[in-house]
């Protein structure tokens, strides 16, 4: 730890160089091994990663692919989703969840989020089934690394006879309230190796899990142009393979994944305690009179494991941008996940969703800020972030009260 003053402490939103410094000596030889082999597509590293991932995610099969967006697309295509079908997904998520539906010519049907967890809301999901015909699949997201209410989603899927594809892009190793890993209970689970994820590659990558052998085989064909055997194509797939260099890097990183996720949990617990001590409330509780106008994430339910791919706080919409600027002035990186819910995105205007229809997603889009949470943060950085957030929210809200 340095003895620098708070003014000199910088805290990027994510510091991948800090992580790389701790594993460089493990990574360099495996990268060299792949280069020496000149075996870049397919090969033993892919099989090894798929095997390790299936075990880690408590699923029978894992199928590597080019990225987490393709993972969703391959899953839906393998399930027979096609033009004219409707697929239900949350509005408050990264674009790829719905983008993959659209890429198949199907129509995304959006639903609202739960205001405390920001995950897909079961009541809103049930309502969507009452209003839309032709829904052929549900794609809930385990947002920010916390499991959605999977029991409810699976029950709704069963009720309507449609499969549940878990978008677990942000949630490798996340467990639901039964201690089950995400991606093991839905018919298919999809994951991203985008570098900012808890398990990130040195570029794009993704993986898909399933317990269904026929689906696994179909997705293996589809990721390789639908080819089986070589140069024979019973259906049209795509080129969406994971490459051997990524697999080699990811195999090394997997050894550290649980320790990294535990580091994120520890950092989250520190922020939670700091914010609670300053008078903030969790995202499931009303703000207390005279307390701090800040909400930290509601604790994961008993039995569940939140891996904190993101740590997201919430402040009144009127001060959100100013708080973000205050943090930037103190060299603290933040991000807004996500400023526009998907039902209000320009490209989905043709679906005719109106403003106000999903109040929780829209409020979250106005009020949330993601803070640095990566495991390599040192105490001085954590202190700087917690203190700066508290001071900024206090100053900005007292300014507002004075102006009224
Ligand atoms: C919820 C969610 N779904 C899908 C994706 C797509 O993953 P990728 O960027 O690997 O295509 C992401 C990536 O950030 C995501 O957060």
Image (cartoon, rainbow, N blue to C red):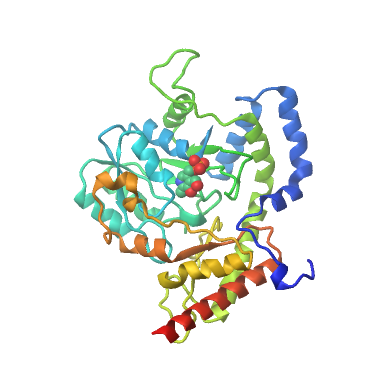
Residue 253 screen position, x and y as percent = 67, 44
Split into 4 quadrants, where in the image is the N terminus? bottom right
Residue 165 visible to an observer of this rendering: no
In the depicted structure, whether residue 320 falls above or below residue 186: below
Report the side of 165 relative to 208 (left or right): left
Front-lying residue, 66 or 121? 66
The residue at 70%/66% (across/down) is 9
Q: Position of residue 258 (x, y in %)?
A: 64, 52
Front-most of 192 and 230?
Answer: 192
Give me the residue at 57% from left, 49% from top. Answer: 197
- The quarter of the rendered structure image containing the C terminus is bottom left
- Residue at horizontal 52%, vertical 76%? 393
How many marks overall? Answer: 0
Picture quadrant of residue 201: top right
Does residue 125 appear in this view? yes
Instruction: Answer with left or right where residue 236 lies relative to residue 373.
Output: left
Answer above or below: position of 323 versus 123. below
Residue 148 occupies quadrant = bottom left
Q: Residue furthest top?
A: 231
| Residue occupying the far front of the picture | 403
Is 319 situated above or below 55?
below
**Residue 76 drawn at (x, y percent):** 38, 36
> Where is 130 relative to 49, above or below?
below
Residue 402 in the image: state x and y as whole percent. Answer: 44, 86
């Amino acid at each position: 730890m340095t003895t620098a003053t708070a003014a000199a402490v910088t805290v990027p939103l994510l510091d991948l160089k800090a992580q790389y410094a701790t594993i460089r000596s493990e990574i360099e030889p495996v990268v060299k091994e792949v280069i020496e082999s000149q075996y870049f597509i397919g090969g033993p590293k892919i099989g090894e990663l798929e095997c390790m991932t299936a075990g880690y995610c408590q699923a029978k099969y894992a199928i590597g692919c080019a990225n987490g967006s393709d993972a969703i697309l391959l899953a839906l295509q393998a399930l027979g989703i096609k033009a004219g079908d409707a697929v239900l997904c949350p509005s408050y998520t990264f674009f790829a969840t719905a983008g993959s539906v659209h890429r198949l010519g199907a129509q995304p049907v959006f639903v609202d989020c739960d205001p405390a967890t920001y995950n897909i809301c079961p009541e809103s999901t049930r309502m969507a089934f009452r209003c839309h015909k032709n829904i052929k699949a549900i794609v809930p997201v385990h947002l920010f690394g916390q499991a959605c209410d999977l029991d409810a989603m699976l029950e709704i899927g069963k009720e309507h006879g449609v499969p549940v594809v878990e978008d677990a892009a942000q949630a490798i190793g996340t467990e639901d309230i039964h201690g089950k890993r995400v991606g093991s209970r839905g018919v298919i689970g999809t994951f991203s190796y985008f570098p900012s994820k808890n398990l990130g590659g040195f570029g794009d990558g993704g993986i898909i899990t399933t317990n269904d052998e026929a689906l696994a085989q179909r997705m293996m064909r589809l990721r390789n142009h639908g080819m089986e055997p070589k140069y024979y194509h019973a259906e049209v797939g795509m080129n969406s393979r994971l490459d051997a260099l990524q697999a080699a890097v990811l195999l090394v990183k997997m050894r550290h994944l649980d320790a990294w996720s535990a580091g994120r949990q520890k950092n989250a617990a520190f922020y939670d305690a700091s914010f609670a001590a300053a008078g903030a409330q969790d995202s499931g509780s009303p703000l207390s009179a005279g307390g701090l106008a800040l909400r930290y994430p509601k604790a994961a339910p008993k039995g569940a494991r939140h891996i904190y791919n993101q740590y997201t706080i919430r402040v009144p919409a009127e001060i959100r941008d100013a708080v973000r600027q205050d943090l930037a002035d103190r060299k603290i990186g933040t991000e807004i996940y996500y400023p526009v819910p998907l039902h209000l995105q320009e490209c989905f205007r043709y679906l005719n969703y109106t403003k106000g229809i999903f109040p929780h997603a829209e409020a979250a889009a106005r009020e949330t800020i993601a803070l640095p949470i990566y495991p390599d943060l040192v105490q001085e950085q954590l202190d700087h972030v917690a203190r700066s957030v508290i001071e900024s929210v206090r100053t900005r809200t007292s300014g507002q009260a004075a102006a009224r």
